[in-house]
Image (cartoon, rainbow, N blue to C red):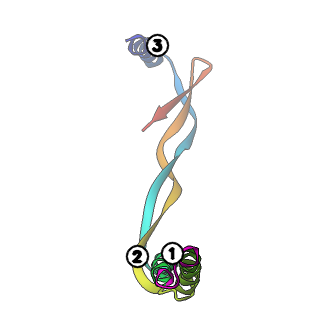
Amino acid sequence: MRLFLVSMIFLSNAALSEVEIVSERARLVMVTHQECEMKEVYVDNSLGNSLLGGIIGGLLGKQIGNGSGKDIATVLGAIAGTNVGRTRSSGRMQRREVCHDVQEEVKKGKYVTLRVEGSLHTILVD
């Protein structure tokens, strides 16, 4: 309400006095939006292969020996299976949508500097 009253007083005084436009300049604001595109990307499944190899190696190692030897064979089988699974990566190319943020300056209105009764006033005009 206060802003409305001040603007009414300013505009009523400005209507009775001489108003000169001193300068105008664009108001630029930063806008962020996403740009997306389809790309061929390499999908690596080495983690899944390592886990599967470790499980299979552990199961095979469990079949060997008895007692603490069986436990050692299970651990060694799991380690060996993990290494084999990691080296047998089944990576492949896939089409995926890849997005990234883009910022750009956009003109949104302008600043106008006015001289009213000798004093300067800058206003934003959309």
Asked whether the residues under the numbered discs 3 and 2 touch, taking CB atoms below 8 Å apart as contact, a structural biologist would say: no
Which of these two is toward me, 56 or 14?
56
Which mark is nearer the camera, 2 or 1?
Answer: 1
What segment carries the magenta color? 61-70
Asked whether the residues under the numbered discs 3 and 1 touch, taking CB atoms below 8 Å apart as contact, a structural biologist would say: no
Q: Earlier in the sequence, mark 2 or mark 1?
A: 1
Q: Is residue 95 left or right of residue 68?
A: left
The alpha-carbon separation of the residues under discs 3 and 1 comes to 75 Å
Residue pictured at 49% horizontal, 33% vertical: 124
> Disc 2 marks which residue?
96
Residue pictured at 49% horizontal, 78% vertical: 58
Q: Quadrant of the N terminus?
A: top left
> Disc 3 marks which residue?
13
Picture disc at residue 14: none
| Circle 3 crowding by C-alpha within 10 Å: few under 14, some 14–19, many from 20 | few
> Disc 1 marks which residue?
47
* Above or below, comparing residue 26 to residue 63 in the picture: above
Asked whether the residues under the numbered discs 2 and 1 touch, taking CB atoms below 8 Å apart as contact, a structural biologist would say: no
Residue 36 location (% of width, % of height): 42, 68
Q: Secondary structure at mark 1?
A: helix
